Image (spheres, helix red, strand yellow):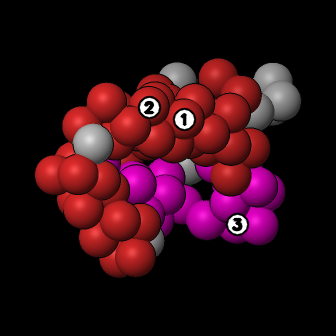
Amino acid sequence: MDRLETLLASLVVADPLAALEAVGRVEGLIEREAPAAGVAARGRGATWVEIGRAVGSSRQAAYQRFARHLPRVADADNPS
């Protein structure tokens, strides 16, 4: 991730439009892969607190972001 950050920062200086294109592609990749990663983490027993920490958000924000991608089952970690 540090390498990606360094490359993007260099690209911003050298070619801002190319940097924007790269950012757009990374955002698309994140949109496609993040739900699967959240579901996989939950499936392996990660708590919503741990998932939130991993993505830099609160437990509630992580739940709101990823829970909709989980199969419909009772969630003891977030009772409704």
Q: Which residues are magenta?
A: 38-58
Quick check: 2 left or right of 66? left
Q: Residue at x 29, y 70 (%)?
A: 6
Identify whether 7 is placed above or below 79. below
Of 59 and 37, which appears nearest the observer? 37
User: Residue 72 is drawn in which quadrant?
Assistant: top right
- Which secondary structure lies at badge 1? helix
Q: Which residue is mark 3?
A: 45
- Say if the magenta span includes residue 77: no
Task: Verify CB contact (< 8 Å) between mark 2 and mark 1.
Answer: yes
What number is the disc on residue 21? 2
Tell me if residue 3 can be seen.
Answer: yes
Q: Which residue is mark 1?
A: 25
* Mark 3 or 1: the one toward you: 1
Disc 3 to disc 2, how far (Cα)? 36 Å
Question: Residue extending furthest left?
Answer: 13
